[in-house]
Image (cartoon, coloured by chain):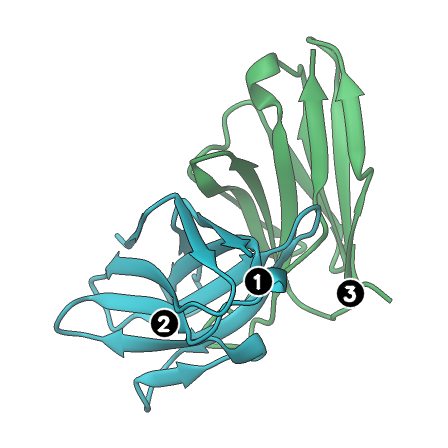
Chain colours: A cyan, B green
Amino acid sequence: AQSVTQLGSHVSVSEGALVLLRCNYSSSVPPYLFWYVQYPNQGLQLLLKYTTGATLVKGINGFEAEFKKSETSFHLTKPSAHMSDAAEYFCAVSDWGGTASKLTFGTGTRLQVTL
Amino acid sequence: DADVTQTPRNRITKTGKRIMLECSQTKGHDRMYWYRQDPGLGLRLIYYSFDVKDINKGEISDGYSVSRQAQAKFSLSLESAIPNQTALYFCATSDLRDPYNEQFFGPGTRLTVL
């Protein structure tokens, strides 16, 4: 069974500072990993995903994440936070196996960006 | 031109009432999912369906039922609503041909059970 742990339910950074949101996973098969973002009063939208190949994945709005198998991590980073980045972020792992496929989500990290 | 739509967007109901949440999609995807979101708990899977004849329970299906009326429509029902079903509900879809299962979400339905 898969699981995802997001360390820190709330993270606060200053505008222009580095954003680091942590995600660790557990999976019995090679994982497919996702970061989704949820802006206030909206559904989730995909930020980026890791499937195979390059372990550093670039997404929308300047975010990127690095898959580290040895650390079972997939942390999300952005060099310089913007006020518009304030949202809730979810890490997820896919249990792909044939046609049976589900996503398991972490509990989310709410990012606050201050002036 | 939303690809995944949910109705209603907000609903307040009373304990014991039957309520249906509807999801429609124009993405042509076969896989559809219902999740609920609670603060501090993330998203938890209620039911999922891979085609019109396929319905599967998720991790928290008790108290809920679903109907897949067509490829594009997947409804969630609460037969007798209770206050701890107050939550934000999301519908999602994905393409059966996608081996990674990237999911696309609707805008959500905020349900309050008094």
Name the residue type under label 1: Asp
Earlier residue among tags 1 and 2:
2
Could you give the CA–CA distance between mark 1 and mark 2, rounded to whole angstroms? 24 Å
Residue on which the image places disc 1: A85
Residue at screen point 60% across, 61% down = A83
Question: What kind of residue is marked 3?
Answer: Asp
Residue at the left extreme, as displayed: A70
Question: Looking at the picture, how far across and down is residue B8, in whole percent?
Answer: 82, 37
Q: Is residue A93 left or right of residue B27?
A: left
SS for callout 1: helix
Residue A101, image quadrant? bottom left
Q: Chain of mark 3?
A: B
Residue indicated by mark 3:
B3
Same chain for the residues under marks 2 and 3 in the image = no
**Total numbered badges shown on the rendered structure:** 3
Q: Residue sitting at 55 percent across and 49 percent down?
A: B48
Q: Residue at x 30, y 70 (%)?
A: A31
Instruction: Determine which of the numbered discs, if any, sits on residue B9 in the image.
Output: none
Numbered disc 2: secondary structure? strand
Q: Hey, what amino acid is under mark 2?
A: Tyr
Alpha carbon distance from label 1 to label 3:
24 Å
User: Horizontal and vertical percent for residue A95?
Assistant: 35, 62
**Which residue matches tag 2?**
A32
B60 w.r.t. A111: above or below:
above
* Residue A16 place in picture, x, y as percent: 49, 70
| Residue B58 visible | no
Real-space CA distance between mark 2 and mark 3, rounded to the nearest whole angstrom:
24 Å
Which of discs 1 and 3 lies nearer the camera? The answer is 1
